[in-house]
Image: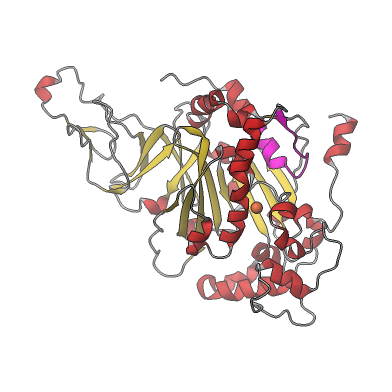
Amino acid sequence: MTATSERQTTGRSRGISYQQLLDTDTHPVPQCLREQSAPYLGDHDVPVAYYTERRYHELEKQKLWAKVWQFACREEHIPEPGDTYVYDIADRSYLIVRDRDGAIRAYPNACLHRGRQLRDGAGRVTELRCSFHGFCWNLDGSLRQVPCQWDFPQIDQDKFHLPEVRVGTWAGFVFINPDPGCEPFEEFIGVLPAQFERWDLANRFVEVHVAKRIAANWKIAQEAFSEAFHVVATHPQLLPGIGDANSQYDVWGNVSRAITPNGTPSPHISWVPTEQEMFDSMVDRRLDEEPVLEVPDGMTARELSAKASREALRPIVGDAIDEFCDAELVDSLDYSLFPNFHPWGAFNRIVYRFRPNGDDHRSCIMECLYLSPFSGERPPPAEVHWLDFEEDWMQADELGSLARVFDQDSFNMPKVMSGLLSATKPGLTLGLYQESKLRQFYNQLEEYFALREETPR
Ligand SMILES: [Fe+2]
């Protein structure tokens, strides 16, 4: 590392640092929030061609999606033996199955006869039967029946097994990796289980699941949620109550995170907001709306927000909620697992996933799931609420006030896509710290491009 790069990567915004803010917490702060990992990730530009050129989409299909561990579904989507789920990525489709013994298995979603997809969607079955000619497999992938078997003397019944795709699970999330020679799942996810030890995402249910098609490359959409740098221009209404430029960014291998403090003023504003103004901004209160809560004298917006969250969660979580600090109840703890999975920490509820829209590199699917705690019997997961290109997030009432913020984000995305298609400057110039998550992503992606063999089709 050169002296110049050390100088550059230690640059930080004025204003209170996240670690200093944690010192003011009314509860003990967990170690995971105290950790910091901000290595130098380079200062090079990211090629515009990664977003615009078809050949990089083809390269992603061959060297990323065919090789990487990726979030497919939640275990709650396939709770019982025979439950199936179809996960599509780019031009490929995978079938996730709960076997009779409770194990989760995955197969390419293709019949070994003429290749028709074995399943068109989720559902409970006793066997995997192709609806074209009726070739049939057991849930464990072993061959069950060949119709007109007299006509297939060449089929060795013991070898005509559905090819297995590797499966890993963490915190109720099911991941697959189509590469039989891939690294172990536990190695791939690295620090994620340790970081989430206090936040039991396995015992949450999918209360909300919205998927929206967006006219932009999937990485453009993902990167709109990878830093708080854009808040000053895209969400200025939040500035009185968000420490946007005082966010903390960390990277550890395939895992990265952006922690954005709430209930603290942005260093971008030149006036000092009252605690009430900070609180109103946190809840996105409009001028003509009554205050959600009045901040009592002697209390801060952060303290009130944390207290309100604790009391809202107490009937579900019980008194264990008192073990969580203000930061865990107030701040945005946005974790990412390469390449496209974004579970938020503590009780933020949000999980994002970004994928190409089928085989189109100029459009994508962004999903937002809310994982909520529950008491008693696990409620069934929400059905996916699809929003097409022209439909706003605001049409998904279940998202609550975040829909307005998502619409502000999504407004930029097609305009980034068309801007990049017009750009003559060959690269994106990224910040060294605030855009750490982007830099880390491209460093990882380039490793996949360079090291992984192309998958023969
Ligand atoms: Fe945003």
User: From the viewer's perspective, is 312 left or right of 332?
Assistant: left
| The stretch drawn in magenta includes residue 229 | no
Residue 373 shown left or right of residue 143 in the figure? right
Occupied quadrant, residue 445? top right
Residue drawn at point x = 46 percent, y = 21 percent: 455
Residue 6 spot, x, y in % from top left:
86, 36
| Residue 421, picture quadrant | top right
Quadrant in the picture for the N terminus:
top right
Residue pictured at 58% horizontal, 42% vertical:
414
Instruction: Classify residue 213 as left or right of residue 246.
Output: left
- The foreground one among 187 and 266 is 266
Q: Is residue 339 visible?
A: no
Q: Position of residue 107 (x, y in %)?
A: 35, 34
User: x, y percentage for residue 248?
Assistant: 75, 51
Left/right of residue 110 with respect to residue 299 in the rendered view? left
The quarter of the rendered structure image containing the C terminus is top left
Q: Which residues are magenta?
A: 427-442
Viewer can see residue 384: yes
Q: Residue at x 41, y 38 (%)?
A: 88
Residue farthest to the bottom, as pictured: 297
- Residue 329 coordinates in the image, percent (x, y): 65, 65
User: Vertically, is 163 above or below 197?
Assistant: above
- Looking at this view, name the residue that lies furthest to the top: 154
Magenta stretch holds residue 428: yes
The residue at the point 78 percent across, 56 percent down is 18
